[in-house]
Amino acid sequence: MIDNAKKLRFELAENGLTAFADYRRHDNRYVIVHVEADPALRGTGAAGRLMAAIVAQAREKNLQIVPRCAYAVAWFKRHPDAADVLE
């Protein structure tokens, strides 16, 4: 996963395709506003792997995550082990 700071999004490339999460950075928080995967990646778990990488980075940098898009909210509900990074 890369943090494309110029576009304000995290990107995960798989098989030449991209899943991404648009974010805003406020103080010590990542506000996840939109998560999307290339149509060919949908159903492969790419967006979930992207979210897991975002959580890992947040932990590493001691940041909190504020999920605002429906996918991110649902992902956190399915992964209670990641709740430590939620604001």
Image: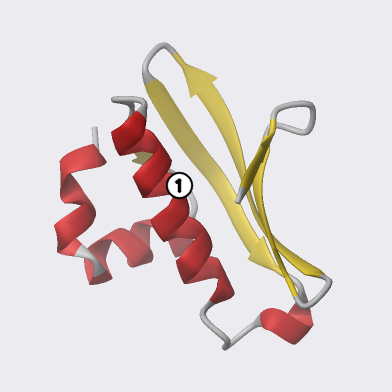
SS at badge 1: helix
Which quadrant of the view contains residue 29?
A: top left
Seen from this angle, which residue lies furthest right? 16
Left or right of 61? Residue 2 is: right
Q: Is residue 76 visible?
A: yes
Task: Tell me: residue 83, above or below residue 40.
Answer: above
List x then y, in percent, for residue 23: 58, 36
List x then y, in percent, for residue 66: 36, 37
Left or right of 62? Residue 51 is: right
Task: Tell me: residue 28, above or below residue 85.
Answer: above
Left or right of 31? Residue 82 is: left
Task: Tell me: residue 83, above or below residue 7.
Answer: below
Mark 1 — residue? Answer: 54
Q: Is residue 65 visible?
A: no
Task: Tell me: residue 65, above or below residue 55.
Answer: above
Left or right of 9? Residue 60 is: left
Which residue is drawn at the image coordinates 35% and 66% (left, top)? 74
Locate the C terminus by quadrant: top left
**Residue type (three-letter) at the residue carrying disc 1:** Ile
Nearer to me, 85 or 26 = 85
Model colouring: secondary structure
Which quadrant of the view contains residue 13?
A: bottom right
Which residue is drawn at the image coordinates 24% and 65% (left, top)? 77
Which residue is drawn at the image coordinates 57% and 86% (left, top)? 44
How packed mark 1 is, by other alpha carbons closer than 10 Å (few <14, some 14-19, many 20 or more), is: many
